[in-house]
């Protein structure tokens, strides 16, 4: 998922790598992160949110089918 976020954001012109993203996610740095890395991190957050919503919807459908 993270690799996809990096590739998707590069289409829009960001200059971030998977290594940059992983470093950003694992290290608490005192300095502000580069904007491009933050943008890629946001892509990951949005994709995770979307996947969670899909899982929830699929679970509801399965429960509803079981009660029908």
Image (tube, rainbow, N blue to C red):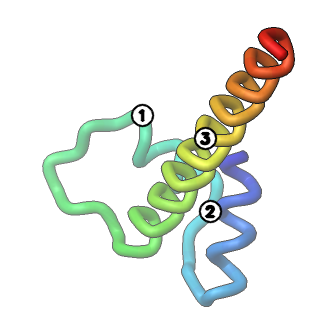
Q: Residue furthest bottom?
A: 13
- The kind of secondary structure element at disc 3 is helix
Q: SS of the residue at dot 2? A: loop
24 left or right of 22 in image = left
Residue drawn where x is 62% and y is 52% of the image: 47
Rendered image quadrant of residue 61: top right
Residue furthest to the left = 30
Q: Tell me the tag on residue 17.
A: 2
Residue reaching furthest to the front = 68
Q: Which x, y percent locates residue 23?
A: 46, 44
Question: Quick one: SS at disc 1?
Answer: helix
For label 3, the crowd category at 10 Å Cα-Cα, with few meaning under 14, some 14 to 19 and many 20 or more, is few
Up/down of 14 relative to 22, above or below: below
Horizontal side of 7 relative to 33 (left or right) equals right
- In the foreground, 49 or 31: 49
**Which residue is labeled 1 in the image?**
26
Percent of width and height locating residue 10: 67, 79
Left or right of residue 54: residue 33: left
Q: Nearer the viewer, residue 19 or 52?
A: 52
């Amino acid at each position: 998922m993270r690799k996809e976020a990096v590739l998707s954001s590069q289409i829009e012109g960001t200059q971030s790598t998977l290594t940059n993203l992983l470093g950003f996610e694992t290290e608490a740095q005192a300095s502000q992160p580069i904007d491009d890395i933050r943008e890629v991190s946001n892509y990951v957050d949005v994709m995770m949110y979307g996947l969670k919503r899909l899982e929830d919807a699929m679970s509801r459908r399965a429960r509803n089918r079981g009660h029908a």
